[in-house]
Image: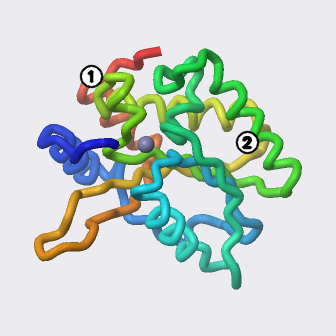
Amino acid sequence: MASKLTNNELVLVKSLKNAEVLQDLDPHLLDQRDGIIIVACADGDYFFDLFSHHARTQIHRTDPRMHTFGWHGGALACAPCSPVNPVKRADDVFMRQIADARSLKDIHLVGLYAHMPCGAVRTCGIPMEKALALQVRAYARVKAVNHGIKVACFLHVDYGRRVGGGKNFHSYYFSPEKWERWAQQHNVQPIV
Ligand SMILES: [Zn+2]
């Protein structure tokens, strides 16, 4: 099980929020009329919150339509040769699943989720900022190999228990463009 966020990770999240890499999603800006293909980490400790929150963003529909893939690391596992996959080239299988979902369900929007803290990231020993660089690589790859597809990135953060009990979760829209600027300023080097 993933432990709590470290102080360094909390500082990272704050910095990303200040730079508007992480923002609250305005549901009006994401056209989900045909639904969305969701890629997320399988971790059951946070998944219900992610799923139910995302369902509420589908304001253009009367009923949610979320074609969902859950595997360890979520979006991070889709980066080329991702270190979060113990099986080499598992990313190719995940990419194929996304392409198949698109053609089977006629859904042309993919939501790529990562989350913090993530056990798959902890297990492979990479720092969170490098994991987020993987998310942006996955974003570029899904776009590059699926002509005309729309891709949006998200980060789910578990801030731990609230004082007095209850979970303290938040889902953010993650801007790959603003990330690039932030990563350059903070000298984040890709790992693969
Ligand atoms: Zn995870």
What residue is drawn where x is 64% and y is 18%?
89
What residue is shown with label 2? Answer: 98
The residue wearing badge 1 is 187
Badge 1 amino acid:
Asn
The CA distance from mark 2 to mark 1 is: 31 Å
Mark 1 residue crowding within 10 angstroms, few (<14) / some (14–19) / many (20+): few
Residue at far right of view: 104
Residue at the (54%, 32%) spot, across then down: 77
Residue 182: % across, % down: 31, 36
Task: State the count of labels.
Answer: 2
Residue 82: x %, y % from top left? 52, 22
Seen in the picture, residue 99 relative to 32 is either above or below; the reply is above
Q: At 36% across and 27% down in the image, what residue appears?
A: 123
**Amino acid beneath label 2:** Ile
* Residue 83 coordinates in the image, percent (x, y): 47, 20
Q: What element carries label 2?
A: helix
Position above or below: 11 against 49: above
Crowd around label 2: few <14 · some 14–19 · many ≥20 (10 Å): many
